[in-house]
């Protein structure tokens, strides 16, 4: 399959490109290097230096003998998007090219406007390019479990059957996002749903939980091919941050009471979910939603697990509850459905002590690069 990956330089984009390329798909990646530039500007570099996309593509070709096409450009520029579509004619597009950080989106007005513009205009341009050049192309958009918030009822996969005054209707599941970033993911979902109804697009929205991990089979033997692993309070996700905090001998920063529960998954499962979704495309006119995670944990559960795994390596990680910089429920009901991807054949990697120990060992190999000034949160929601 010809697959175009938007946001191919990022934490998920590059490992997805290698995963699909290794399995014989023809892959092209697009990126505007937003994440690299934001990390330079905010002085929060990833744990392992990440060669640029052209360098990684060369390395990939040399070691795996497969080609990946690279285009550097901005998806908010329709001329650029049109050129890529005309030249590559994708059969599937994986859309990761959004500003992905909740704290970044809440930093200031400029970051808010950037997040809104980038995330919505890029999605709108993608929709128009698909209609103009490849109307049968399947769009796989990375959404987030955070669009649902933490309602006091079960979360379904995308839709909710509602009975009202004796009549029934199937609606998109109500959304209650907890950051501007998460709100843009609700909005881009609405945009895609709208155009599925108007133009018969084929779309799958993957509502993903926080991802952890760094290595995939393709990068295991070559650190020059690893993912963009951030551990700072803006771009790092919670479990990755706890691992780096433990390795650095710094406290594990549980925000508030630590009862915030989310659905987590291993980086390798993200890649498997995306491939399964591409291999089983949505129907024309269908806006399909999968909840993409494999198990739920509270933030405190995660901190305790990292603490325990650290003990095996002689680390004594302290857990501290710090005032929550976000506005979110710290103790709540959480029971989201997630059967769609399992039904397609996903075989999950669960979080184990051995897996945590392995990740800690990897982080410790790069310990001299940890900047401990990046470990405490700096952005507040209020
Ligand atoms: N948290 C802590 N301590 C920390 C960092 C985070 O307690 O040091 C807590 C947060 O308050 C939150 C939970 O951990 O309750 C998850 O935070 P996170 O930073 O790992 O995840 P989040 O900001 O929600 O965003 C991440 C990705 C985003 C993705 C989302 C999935 O950055 O792109 O969409 O996970 S989800 O959380 O399901 O919305």
Image (cartoon, rainbow, N blue to C red):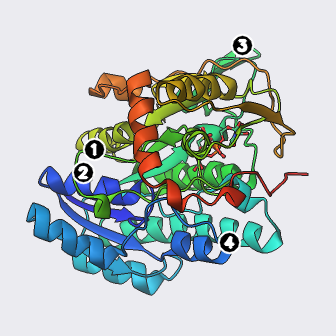
- Going by the picture, which residue comes out furthest to the right? 382
Assign a secondary structure to mark 3: loop
Q: Where residue 42 is drawn, which disc sits there?
A: 4
| Distance from Cα at disc 2 to Cα at disc 1 | 9 Å
Q: Horizontal and vertical percent for residue 88?
A: 23, 74
| Distance from Cα at disc 1 to Cα at disc 3 | 41 Å
Check contact, mark 1 vs mark 3: CB within 8 A: no
Which of the 4 quarters of the picture holds residue 25? bottom left
Label 3: which residue?
166
Of labels 3 and 2, earlier in sequence is: 2
Q: Quadrant of ligand 1?
A: top right
Assign a secondary structure to mark 2: helix
Of labels 2 and 1, earlier in sequence is: 2
In-image side of 179 versus 364 (left or right)? right
**Mark 3 against mark 2, which lies toward the viewer?**
2
**Which residue is at 56% across, 67% downward?**
45
Q: Where residue 77 is drawn, which disc sits there?
A: none
Of labels 3 and 4, earlier in sequence is: 4
Assign a secondary structure to mark 4: helix
**Mark 1 against mark 4, which lies toward the viewer?**
4
In-image side of 11 versus 111 (left or right)? left
Label 2: which residue?
19
Q: Where residue 275 is drawn, which disc sits there?
A: 1
Residue nearest the viewer, comparing 250 with 300: 250
In-image side of 354 versus 289 (left or right)? left
Up the image or down, 10 lies above or below 344; here it is below
């Amino acid at each position: 399959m010809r697959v175009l990956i938007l946001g191919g330089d990022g934490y998920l984009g590059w490992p997805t490109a290698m995963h699909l390329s290794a399995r014989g798909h023809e892959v092209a990646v697009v990126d505007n290097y937003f994440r690299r530039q934001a990390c330079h500007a905010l002085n929060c570099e990833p744990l392992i230096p990440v060669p640029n996309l052209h360098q990684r593509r060369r390395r990939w070709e040399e070691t795996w003998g497969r080609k990946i096409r690279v285009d550097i450009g901005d998806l908010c520029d329709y001329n650029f998007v049109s050129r890529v579509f005309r030249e590559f004619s994708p059969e599937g597009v994986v859309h990761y090219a959004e500003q992905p950080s909740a704290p970044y989106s809440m930093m200031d007005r400029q970051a808010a406007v950037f997040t809104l513009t980038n995330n919505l205009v890029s999605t709108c341009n993608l929709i128009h390019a698909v209609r103009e050049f490849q109307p049968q192309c399947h769009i796989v958009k990375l959404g987030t479990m955070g669009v649902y918030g933490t309602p006091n009822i079960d979360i379904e996969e995308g839709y909710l059957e509602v009975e009202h005054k004796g009549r029934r209707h199937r609606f998109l599941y109500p959304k209650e996002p907890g950051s501007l970033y998460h709100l843009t993911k609700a909005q881009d979902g609405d945009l895609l749903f709208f155009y599925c109804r108007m133009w018969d697009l084929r779309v799958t929205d993957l509502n993903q939980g926080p991802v952890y991990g760094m290595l995939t089979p393709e990068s295991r033997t070559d650190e020059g091919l690893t993912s963009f692993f951030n551990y700072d309070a803006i771009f790092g996700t919670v479990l990755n941050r706890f691992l780096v905090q433990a390795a650095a001998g710094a406290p594990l920063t549980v925000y508030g009471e630590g009862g915030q529960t989310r659905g987590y998954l291993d980086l390798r499962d993200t890649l498997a979910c995306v491939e399964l979704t591409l291999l089983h495309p949505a129907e024309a006119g269908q806006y399909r939603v999968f909840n993409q995670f494999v198990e739920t944990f509270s933030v405190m559960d995660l901190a305790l697990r990292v603490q325990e795994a650290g003990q095996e390596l002689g680390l004594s990680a302290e857990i501290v509850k710090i005032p929550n910089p976000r506005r979110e429920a710290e103790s709540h009901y959480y029971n989201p459905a997630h059967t769609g991807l399992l039904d397609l054949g996903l075989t999950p990697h669960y979080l184990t002590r051995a897996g945590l120990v392995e990740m800690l060992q990897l982080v410790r190999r790069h310990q001299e690069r940890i900047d401990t000034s990046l470990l405490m949160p700096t952005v507040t929601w209020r």
